[in-house]
Amino acid sequence: MSPVTINLTLPGYRILRWESNLMMRVYVEALDAPRLCACCGGGRLRSKGRYQRRVRHLACFGHMSELVIACRRYHCVDCSRSFVQPLPGIRPGRRSTEPWREAIYERHDDGICASTLAQRETLGQATVARIYAQFTERKARERLSLDCPRVLGIDEHTLHRGQRFATTFCDLKNRRVFDLSPGRSEAELAPYLRSLRGRERVRVVCIDLSNSYRAIIRRWFPRAKIVADRFHAIRLVGLHLLKLARQLCPPLGWNRAWLGLLRTRGDRLEPAQRERLARLFAAHPVLAGIYELKEKLHRLLALKTQSKSSCRHHIRTLLGLISTLRDSGLEPAVTLAKSLAEWTEEIVRMWRFTRNNGITEGFHRKMKLIQRRAYGFRSFSNYRLRVIAQCG
Ligand SMILES: [Zn+2]
């Protein structure tokens, strides 16, 4: 043999010889022959003869390569069954090695589309799809054996086909999607939650201000503290107060320029915008009060990493604002006051923590892209596999 050695990137084989043509063909044999029966574990084996197995392997010097493996079939004297020799790095019945399959998976995952990849590697497109499914399924299976993360973000999103809902469970600490489950009601989620391991160890769950999710968490994550999501809380305030503004000042209507000004945070206003806002307040003084209230609530809800003592101070401010809203007696303000009062505890926890469902919302955007790229999914399990592979 020539002094040049080829690194097979597949341990457990001895190279016998190789031929290099358009296809690099390497003849090898496994280093270890089986000593025990694969079926009964008996040690009395008899060889039934040799055969060759050809499998695709990683490209070598730019050429496609193939391993030609000298194998044997064995007969077990104890249980009188026959079996083929197990080979390291090659699964039973496969015509390619695991490193090669993983390389195909990674290239497809990196964004090379199945048809291009299939053409370059002289494969069928279905083979690429099958390899991809194999690896994503493996990843998703590992997920099932994993314990539930300690800091969870739970939120719903829609599947465009049939307008179905799905719930995302996001690992906020490690910033990745933990799992998906179809549906958003307790009845739909119960089978999944029952199978979830390590539920009782979940410490923090971040949710939007949804009563149904709160009930689910109280029941299924007994030791978890519920934290309100900052984005949703702030949006709720904006929504109700804008409704109130429209009710008290009908000329506001759907005037986008004015609504935009009222929505913008005070410290983000340009000088010109500030002037326009001042003119608006001069014409409709009632808006000034609502804007000030909105600013106060936003400032309060945007707080994070507060100490316990400062939280106590902020609670008093929040309760004061809630009672101001309630005392106004106007419908949108009372509704807002009711929601904030119901969620006070969760909002206070929000001041103590930094993580929020912004991470989950970001993944939802990515999931929408996955849905679009696939032109929708018929099967939820395929969708789940894709999401776990790309966001997990
Ligand atoms: Zn046997």
Image: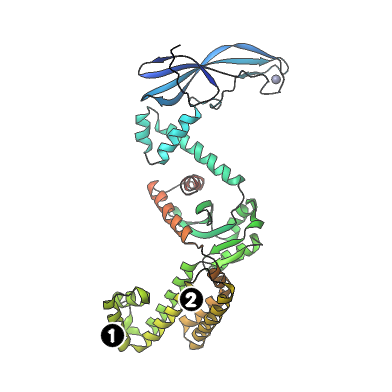
The image quadrant that residue 42 belongs to is: top right
Q: Which residue is mark 2?
A: 300
Near mark 1 (Cα within 10 A), the count class, few <14, some 14-19 or many ≥20, is: few
207, above or below 273, in the image: above
The percent position of residue 5, horizontal first and vertical second, equals 45, 18
Say left or right for 354 vs 258: right
The percent position of residue 116, horizontal first and vertical second, equals 34, 34
Can residue 201 be seen here? yes
The residue lying at 44 percent from left, 77 percent from top is 240
For the residue with label 1, is its CB less than 8 Å from the closest atom of ligand 1? no
Q: Which residue is mark 1?
A: 279
User: Element under label 1?
Assistant: helix
The mark nearer the N terminus, 2 or 1, is: 1
Can residue 263 be seen here? no
Determine which of the numbered discs, if any, sits on residue 351 in the image. Answer: none
Tag 2: amino acid: Leu
